[in-house]
Image (cartoon, rainbow, N blue to C red):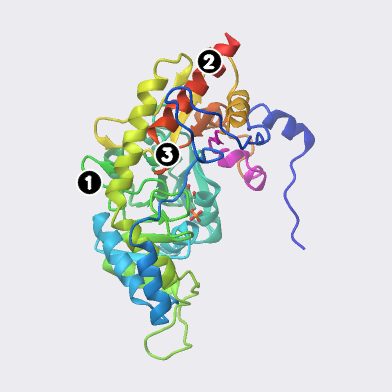
């Protein structure tokens, strides 16, 4: 049986200085909100909630009534076309989740054993895993302190003769500074794939993210800006890449004869029911993005008055979609990030810590032993995000910001 990876105690003792402590228990009763004298009806304020009150139920009912529930139903094509169009792409290949979409994009590009792909150290585990599933090796770059995105000035030093491409992440909804990255990739003959799992609707210099490299992948997990419960999509403007990705997604069945396979394919298909929800959500993507941006503006307005918190930025060329509203808890705040989370949890406010960087993960520790990515480590130590979903009310944001201020006042 497969065994879990355990790090030696001496290593763990060092890592515990950086990685977050245990999850704080959430108290499930929210008191009357003093700011608005208004009762919050939910028992906790979640980090992110789906909003499913458009055409979701109507389209789903059509799946059931028509008996089309597999990936062969028409909503899959309709969703692919609608979503790809919004992302400025001519092709979309819907998948079972964001990780399979990532793997599909990389496998289609032919990434394999002996190859390297550059990824940020500060990302969710799926970015690195997708590279490993192909047999290739991820090579890490550190992040920028302000946008939390991969630092494009550090990319060049990570390129080796084995590098095939760059898999970048638009972290928490802020686009990466693409022009210098694309220029480098072009000069060195590398492909660029966007891991856009967190950034539906973001724009770089008024161009939609998801259309800026050879391909991009999106996640539609329930906490994402639009959701299908579980789901993902590869978007591209390359018809050949889309054709091969479509084939690989479906066991690589060939056109000449059924049950004849000339590629090692996968079953990464999306069901018609997931796509029905996805289409209804895509119809409202712009509205959901505007809600998140308005929530972020409210947070920034209130939290900027509290010393010791570094808030998210929006570069002049960027449209940040604030998938999650992150804050970095600096020493000047007076208590640690983990202590702030514990105290917010007692007030019914759910939060999440920032990512634990790839090189510190038990499964990747030996691969990256001795390597340091100080910005990623600092973000891991100090960063957290606040409730950010589309169902969040203005009153709840006021309650959360007051709670953060009260916690700080308690300590000073
Ligand atoms: C940057 C990034 N890439 C990939 C994924 C994986 O997506 P999924 O959970 O749909 O497989 C996520 C999920 O949150 C993510 O944040």
Whichever of labels 3 and 1 marks the residue nearer the N terminus, that label is 1
Q: Pick whichever, 284 or 321, lies toward us.
A: 284
Is residue 187 something that shows in the picture?
no
Q: Quadrant of residue 306?
A: top left
The percent position of residue 324, horizontal first and vertical second, equals 43, 38
- Mark 2: few/some/many CA within 10 Å (<14, 14-19, 20+): many
* Numbered range of the magenta stretch: 349-366
Is residue 251 something that shows in the picture?
yes
Residue drawn at x 48%, y 69% is 268
Q: Quadrant of residue 407?
A: top right
SS at circle 2: helix
Answer left or right for 305 relative to 209.
right
The percent position of residue 403, horizontal first and vertical second, equals 52, 23
What is the residue that sits farthest to the top in this orientation?
412
Question: Residue 359 magenta-drawn?
Answer: yes
Judge whether 227 appears above or below 267 on screen: above
The dot on residue 207 is: 1
SS at circle 3: loop
Residue designated by label 2: 333
SS at circle 1: strand
Residue designated by label 3: 392
- Mark 3: few/some/many CA within 10 Å (<14, 14-19, 20+): some
């Amino acid at each position: 049986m497969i065994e879990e990876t355990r790090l030696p105690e001496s290593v763990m003792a060092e890592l515990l200085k950086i990685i977050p402590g245990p999850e704080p228990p959430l108290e499930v009763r929210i008191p009357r909100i003093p700011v608005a004298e208004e009762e919050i009806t939910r028992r906790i304020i979640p980090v992110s909630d789906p909003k499913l009150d458009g055409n979701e139920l109507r389209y789903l009912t059509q799946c059931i009534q028509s008996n089309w529930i597999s990936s062969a139903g028409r909503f899959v094509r309709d969703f692919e076309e609608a979503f790809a169009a919004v992302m400025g792409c001519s092709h979309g290949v819907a998948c079972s989740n964001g990780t399979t979409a990532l793997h599909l994009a990389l496998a289609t590009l032919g990434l394999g054993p002996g190859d390297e792909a550059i990824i940020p150290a500060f990302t969710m585990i799926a970015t690195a895993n997708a590279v490993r599933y192909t047999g290739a090796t991820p090579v890490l770059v550190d992040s920028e302190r302000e946008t939390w995105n991969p630092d494009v000035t550090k990319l060049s030093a990570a390129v080796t003769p084995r590098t095939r491409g760059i898999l970048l992440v638009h972290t928490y909804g802020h686009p990466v500074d693409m022009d210098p990255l694309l220029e480098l990739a072009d000069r060195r003959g590398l492909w660029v794939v966007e891991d856009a799992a967190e950034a539906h609707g973001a724009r770089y210099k008024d161009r939609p993210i998801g259309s800026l490299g050879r391909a991009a992948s999106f996640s539609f997990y329930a906490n994402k800006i639009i959701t299908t419960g579980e789901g993902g999509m590869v978007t591209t403007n390359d018809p050949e890449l889309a054709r091969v990705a479509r084939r690989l997604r479906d066991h690589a069945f060939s056109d000449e004869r059924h049950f004849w396979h000339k590629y090692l394919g996968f079953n990464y298909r999306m069901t018609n029911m997931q796509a029905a929800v996805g289409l209804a959500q895509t119809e409202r993507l712009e509205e959901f993005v505007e809600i998140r941006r308005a929530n972020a503006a409210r947070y920034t307005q209130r939290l900027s008055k509290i010393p010791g918190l570094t808030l998210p930025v929006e570069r002049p060329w960027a449209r940040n979609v604030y998938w999650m509203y992150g804050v970095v808890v600096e020493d000047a705040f007076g208590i640690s990030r983990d202590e702030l989370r514990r105290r917010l949890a007692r007030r019914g406010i759910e939060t999440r810590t920032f990512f634990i960087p790839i090189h510190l993960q038990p499964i990747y520790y030996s691969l990256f032993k001795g390597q340091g990515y100080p910005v990623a480590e600092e973000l891991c130590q100090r960063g957290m995000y606040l409730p950010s979903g589309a169902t969040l009310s203005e009153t709840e944001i006021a309650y959360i910001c007051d709670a953060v201020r009260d916690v700080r006042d308690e300590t000073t």
